[in-house]
Amino acid sequence: MRKILDGQQIHKSFDIEKEKINVLQGVSITIYESEFISIMGPSGSGKSTLLYALSGMDTVDSGEIIFNNQRLPACGESELAEIRRQQMGFVFQQPTFLKNLTIIDNIVLPAVRDNKRKTKELAKKAQQLLENTGIGDLAYRMTNQVSGGQLQRAGICRALINEPKIIFGDEPTGALNSKTAEGMMDYFLQVNQEGTTIMLVTHDAKVAAKSERVLFMKDGQIVDELRLGKLAHQQGMDSRIEKVTRKMLRIEM
Amino acid sequence: MYFRVIRNDLFRNKLISITTMLFISAATALVCLAAILSLNLIGSIETLTKQAQVPNFLQMHNGNIDKERLNNFAEEQENVKKYQVLDFLNITNSSIQVGGNNLIDNVQDNGFTTQSSSFDFLLDLEGRPIHPAEGELYVPIGYMTDGTAQIGDEAMIAGKAFKVAGFLRDAQMNSPLASSKRFLVHENDYQDLVSKGTLEYLIEFQLHDTSKTNEFETAYADAGLEANGPALTSTLFKVINGLSDGIMIAIILLVSFLIVLIAFMCIRFTLLIQIEEDYREIGTMKAIGLRLADIKKIYLAKYAFLALAGSLLGLLVSFIFSNPLLENIRLYMGESQYDSWSIFLAILGSIFVFLLVIGYIYFLLRRFRKISAASAIRTGSPEENTARKNYFLLSQNKLMSTNVFLGIKDVLSRKKLYATMLIVLLLSCFIIIVPWNTYHTVSSPSFTKYLGFGEMDLMVSIYPSEEMEENKQQIVNYLNDDASIHQYVEITSKSFRAVKEDGTEEKIIVELGDHAAFPIEYNAGKAPEAPNEIALSSLNAEEFGKQAGDTIEIITGEGPESFVVSGIYSNILNGGKTAKAAFSDETAPAMWLNYYIQLNHANQAAVTAKKMSQVLPFASVTDAHHHKQQVFGSTMDSMKTAANVALIVALFITGLVSLLFMKLVVTKDRSAIATLKAIGFTNQDLTKQYAARGIFILIIGVAGGSILANTFGEAIAGMAISSFGVDSIAFISHPFIYLGFPSLMLIVTLLATKLGTNQAGKIPIAENIKE
Ligand SMILES: Nc1ncnc2c1ncn2[C@@H]1O[C@H](COP(=O)(O)OP(=O)(O)OP(=O)(O)O)[C@@H](O)[C@H]1O
Ligand SMILES: [Mg+2]
């Protein structure tokens, strides 16, 4: 299998009032093409920080990150932006939309910048993505006129509009009720089956249990790993959840 | 208890707080300055009028004089309090040498006189009548300020030596707009000079009842007394004295009005942003039962503090600046009797601005009532208008680049926010265009058309004398022979009597000749062409109660004749009361004769004028450009200075407000910026988006400002120019004013935008994506 994202010995620290806190202390992580990977860990263990580092949204102190054969630490600001725009998709816990644009405009936003002439096709594509997530009739609403769950689904549509190599999610289901969260996860699974690599940060064992591999973080390091294999037809969910929960409990102790 | 909240708030928004305060102080300073200056100007004029004992009616006369007859007239008139005839000894400018300067290039009529014993005194700088010793020369104050003369200078007047002993204030002729200047010498010296110049007379009256000056003027004219020259009244002296400073005060008032508006915009804008930022907290406060009045109090206290500090500072600044500005008024007219009153008025002015600001804050805070606790907590920001959401969609945009689209969309969807910047840019544009257009209009060659004379290069005048016919022929011969002359026209001024509405008769001076050759601008109607047509100056039209199309009865050599008023024009010469007609009347005596001359090359005016005055020594030759420069030069210079100052101020305001505004918007947009960066927009994209917003607002602002300047601004400028006696003007503009200056604004806006938004690139995604 081909490596899509490879991070080695990543260090990252923050300076707070002259005190240096090391948030990532030599993290190494390798993600393969078409993988569905979850990251779990106690609050403050550095999960989000790792995600921002791997996607080039934040710089690192030291270490190497290679995404799709490109060395991210060597890239400039606009190169990183281009990589994020064309090859990555993001879904965050809080919906991050431009408030003065409609849902569909928010979705085409990352795509029209480079393809203004294809606006029509892009709008059509966005509409199709909305239909796929079941909110096709909300395309022309403003972002404050739909529910949180609907907005999260719109977020996935935006992440998918440029057909990225990888989608990063930082607790994309964190603000949703369990039923909505499950629907979201199923959609992620479907996208993954179509070939897109997915990396999610989550607190929820039920979410992690649907992924192929779970990495556990603690105090800025990856301390354990659980290989669950691809989920087929929702089978064996209970035992997968149990395995994740057990490991999680042990790490938190 | 609010003290700490307010203090923290002021510190948190240092830049905003300081700017708001500065605008308030600038507004206060200007309002107070205008108050101080105008009251002192009025006071000084009154002091000068009182000290100099200005005549209520003055008839200048050039020619022989029958003192006996005048005496009788003065005694018969019950209204006459005092009467005198003063000499004005006109000496050619080339014979006047003061220090190292010869007055040959001066266009004023410079004359010499002795101190009056009765009234119309020439005063020293302390306001006392001067009694010069023999050999002493007192020089008009204007020659001190323009550097022509200094105390102690040696002077040579028509071959006689003098020493400049001091400077004099002349309540009649101080102003550069008055065409004559009086020098003062000792009686004995005067006798020595008399033979060297031509004598003119100032026939002066002081009246018991000054409200009947107009009646007296008519009575004088009716009596058929000496009247070869303009007649003037004390009201006109006051106006002329106050004019140039009056214009300055008017400009200061206008600018202060605009600055108050800009200060309001600043306040509105910061308050709006703050309310939005505090929105959730306000909701919470309301939810836990804090009363609205309490919340208002916090805001009000903060701005009351800023307004208080600002208006105190402004008051102080106005006191500091009033002294240098008052210097000119004091120098020309002396101390004002209202000095302490003006301070009182200035304090009132600052209180007025303070109250205005507080009132405005009250007005703005009314929007608080509309915030419901529930909606504030839920959405966290005031609801933006989402009613018309389906227009201007990115998913349908093929025209603009995405960045430009996002910039414009943002402006359109947050109109209230951007209205502030728009109004400031609009006002800035207005502040730039109006003074420049005014200056350009007044300084353009065709402006003379508004002053009642055509676009001529030279004017040759002669007064009636024995050799008149001979002289005329000489002039005409010269004009026909000189190849550098493009065209000329002969205009004779004659005095007639015209019948007023109430049946009484009044003197009217009519310029007879071909008025098509040097066309002028008519406020209404057109030039007189047919022999039964006449055009009136606006003052005369008012005097006789006529409009274009009316008929007026004039008594000519043939008896009373009816004329149609063909047009009305503005004119400031001869007290503004003139008329133009094309008929001829050989019986009426000419008062003076003018030749208007247009050269092939206007820049030859000075040379040709010199040549002509040598060849035609009996005529007075005026270089129209030079004349205009000397009469209006100082006024035009101060207009240009004002226009330049306005330009710099407006550009500064544009830059400062754009900078502040963009900085605040970036802070406000943190999470949107983080989102855009996360999904792959570069820093350059962000810069372009902000620039698009800036340019979009600027375009609307400049368009609006230009329209406003050409309507409202033109009207205001027209009012200012009407002090020259011009009634209605249309701006004569220059492409640079509408293209160049907005381009400057564009550069400033873009620089400010760049500077104000470069922080946007540094906003970390991770910390701001969470909202
Ligand atoms: N910008 C920052 N400045 C200083 N410290 C930070 C910053 N961002 C994160 N940290 C610190 O780094 C550590 C890891 O933060 P991070 O957000 O990665 O945790 P997390 O694992 O995502 O936690 P959670 O599950 O609560 O989201 C925390 O101790 C946090 O306080
Ligand atoms: Mg996190």
Image (cartoon, helix red, strand yellow):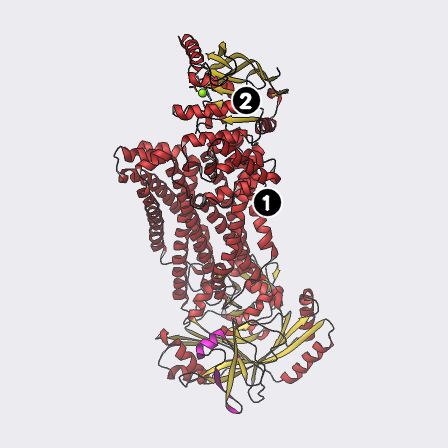
User: For the residue with label 2, is its CB less than 8 Å from the closest atom of ligand 2?
Assistant: no
Query: Which disc is residue B399 wearing?
Result: 1
Residue B636 higher or lower than B315, as above or below:
below
> Where is residue A109, by image quadrant?
top right
Query: Per the image, is A113 magenta?
Result: no
In the rendered structure, the residue with mark 2 lies on which chain? Answer: A
Closer to the camera, A115 or B3? A115
Q: Quadrant of the N terminus of chain B?
A: top left
Closer to the camera, A166 or B290? A166
User: For the residue with label 1, is its CB less than 8 Å from the closest atom of ligand 1?
Assistant: no
Residue type pointed to by label 2: Gln
Q: Callout 1 environment at 10 Å: few (<14), some (14 to 19), or many (20+)?
A: few
Q: Position of residue B226 (x, y in %)?
A: 49, 82
Closer to the camera, A163 or A114? A163
Residue B394 higher or lower than B222, as above or below:
above
Mark 1–mark 2 Cα distance, whole angstroms, equals: 37 Å
Residue B464 higher or lower than B44, as above or below:
below
| Span shown in magenta | B535-559
Q: Position of residue B306 (x, y in %)?
A: 36, 41
Q: Position of residue B159 (x, y in %)?
A: 61, 67
Query: Per the image, is B555 magenta?
Result: yes
